[in-house]
Image (cartoon, helix red, strand yellow):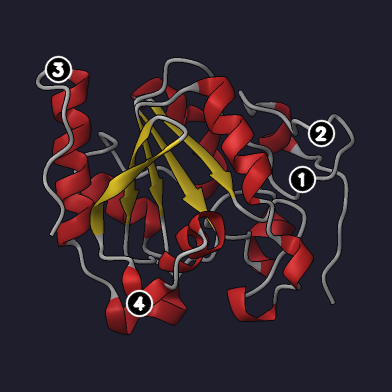
């Protein structure tokens, strides 16, 4: 059963981007602020992440290892260190902030794409990258089969838009590192001020 509990605990207290509803509705706080190069958007916290009050807290999830492996962070952070990400120009949020569990089990009303769009408009990151096709599909209204990995032809509220392979243990069979490497290269170029146009999609 999905639960909706107040956001509390050490990770929440140090988070640079609190629950934007001001009502304790988010299972894990947003990590958002102006001036970010990249915002990574998940679907919903797993049950493990919701209990830990931390992003991608399942030890089998490749997320934190992948960020370090492709050079988005200088070392591998632990899940509870997620509030540090803005130091590297990176933010975090989800399409479904008030529910936990696997994507297929989420109720229809769990998804809040307009809320996500409002956050992108407010904070204006240069790049928004979905960490799975499902989150992108629910936000864009496009079937997952029509979403290639990598940069997309469209933008999201003016931000460059990417779709990445999920790092979840449920998606290990389909995981590819290359789109994450391409994203890291793009972020590095933006950090260095090199180029203003997105690379061509596949």
Task: Identify the residue shown where x is 10% and y is 22%.
Answer: 195
Q: Is 73 above or below relative to 60? A: above
Badge 3: residue crowd in 10 Å (few <14, some 14–19, many ≥20): few
Could you tell which of marks 4 and 1 lies nearer the N-terminus?
Answer: 1
Residue 128: quadrant of the picture: top left
- Look at mark 4 in the image and give the residue it sits on: 145
Q: Tell whether label 1 touches label 3 (CB within 8 Å).
A: no
Q: How far apart are the alpha carbons under marks 4 and 3?
A: 34 Å
- Look at mark 2 in the image and give the residue it sits on: 21
Badge 4: residue crowd in 10 Å (few <14, some 14–19, many ≥20): few
Which of the two marks, 4 or 3, is nearer to us in this view? Answer: 4
Could you tell which of marks 4 and 3 lies nearer the N-terminus?
Answer: 4
In the rendered image, the quadrant that contains the C terminus is bottom left
- Look at mark 3 in the image and give the residue it sits on: 192
Residue 33: quadrant of the picture: top right
Q: How far apart are the alpha carbons under marks 3 and 2?
A: 34 Å
In this picture, residue 151 sits left or right of residue 159: left
Could you tell which of marks 2 and 4 lies nearer the N-terminus?
Answer: 2
**Percent position of residue 133, x then y:** 41, 66
Residue at the outermost bottom position: 173
Could you tell which of marks 3 and 2 lies nearer the N-terminus?
Answer: 2
């Amino acid at each position: 059963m999905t639960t909706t509990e107040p956001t509390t605990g050490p990770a929440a207290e140090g988070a640079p981007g609190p629950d934007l509803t001001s009502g304790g509705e988010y299972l894990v706080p947003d990590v958002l602020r102006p001036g970010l190069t990249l915002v990574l958007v998940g679907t919903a916290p797993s049950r493990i992440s919701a209990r830990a009050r931390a992003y991608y807290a399942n030890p089998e999830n490749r997320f934190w290892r992948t960020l370090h492996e492709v050079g988005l962070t200088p070392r591998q952070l632990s899940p509870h260190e997620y509030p540090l990400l803005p130091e590297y120009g990176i933010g975090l949020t989800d399409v479904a902030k008030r529910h936990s569990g696997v994507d297929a089990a989420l109720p229809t009303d769990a998804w809040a794409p307009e809320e996500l769009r409002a956050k992108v408009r407010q904070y204006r990151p240069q790049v928004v990258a979905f960490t799975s096709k499902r989150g992108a599909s629910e936000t864009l209204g496009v079937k997952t089969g029509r979403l290639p990995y990598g940069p997309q032809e469209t933008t999201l509220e003016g931000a460059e838009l990417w779709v990445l392979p999920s790092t979840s243990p449920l998606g290990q069979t389909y995981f590819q590192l290359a789109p994450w490497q391409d994203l890291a290269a793009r972020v590095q170029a933006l950090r260095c001020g090199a180029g203003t146009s997105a690379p061509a999609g596949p």
